[in-house]
Image (cartoon, grey):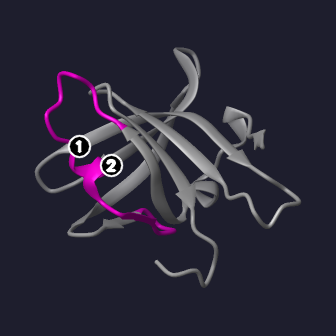
Amino acid sequence: MISRRFEEITPEHISGHWRIKSSTLSPQVSSFPLADVTMHNFRVGGTYEADSISGKWHIERNEEIIPNPILFFEFPDTTYSAMITRLAYMPYSSDKRDELILYFSNGCELVLEKMREGENQ
């Protein structure tokens, strides 16, 4: 797999349907709603849906502090932020899927796998 450079990551790379490949909860967190959903849907334009959760998402950068883009999830009652630690793709393989690794400010990590167009979601 090839990792995208952080400065190349755009909202178009994130948009689409993603499923959880693995999740790691911080010992200080008893439950994390974004780790419990089966499918994450990042829509172009910033709408986010996941099972019974919906809200907005966007990417921010502050490259003077850290090169990694930060992905924000905004819900009516809370906001989560996650550093994108890896966005990888396999350019010439039908077996491999894009992979997105998010490290949240609460210490949780999600590894997401992008669904292919037309695949059961």
Q: Is residue 121 above or below residue 86?
A: below
Residue drawn at x 73%, y 58% as measured from the top left: 96
Name the element at disc 1. strand
Q: Quadrant of residue 79?
A: top left
Pointer 1 residue: 79
Residue drawn at x 16%, y 40% as measured from the top left: 31
Magenta region: which residues?
Answer: 24-46
Relative depth, front residue between 21 and 9:
21
Residue 56 x %, y %: 33, 59
Crowd around label 2: few <14 · some 14–19 · many ≥20 (10 Å): many
Residue 45 x %, y %: 47, 67
Q: Which mark is residue 103?
A: none
Q: Main structural element of the magenta stretch: helix, strand or loop?
A: loop
Q: Is residue 81 left or right of residue 22?
A: left
Is 31 magenta? The answer is: yes
Residue 118 x %, y %: 60, 85
Is 77 magenta? The answer is: no
Name the element at disc 2. strand
Q: Is residue 33 above or below residue 61?
A: below
- The mark nearer the N terminus, 1 or 2, is 2
Q: Is residue 106 above or below residue 96?
A: above
Residue 119 x %, y %: 58, 80
- Label 1 vs label 2: CA separation? 6 Å
CB under 8 Å between discs 1 and 2: yes
Relative depth, front residue between 49 and 119:
119
Pointer 2 residue: 73
Residue drawn at x 31%, y 25% as measured from the top left: 107
Q: Is residue 15 above or below residue 120?
A: above
The amino acid sitting under disc 2 is Phe
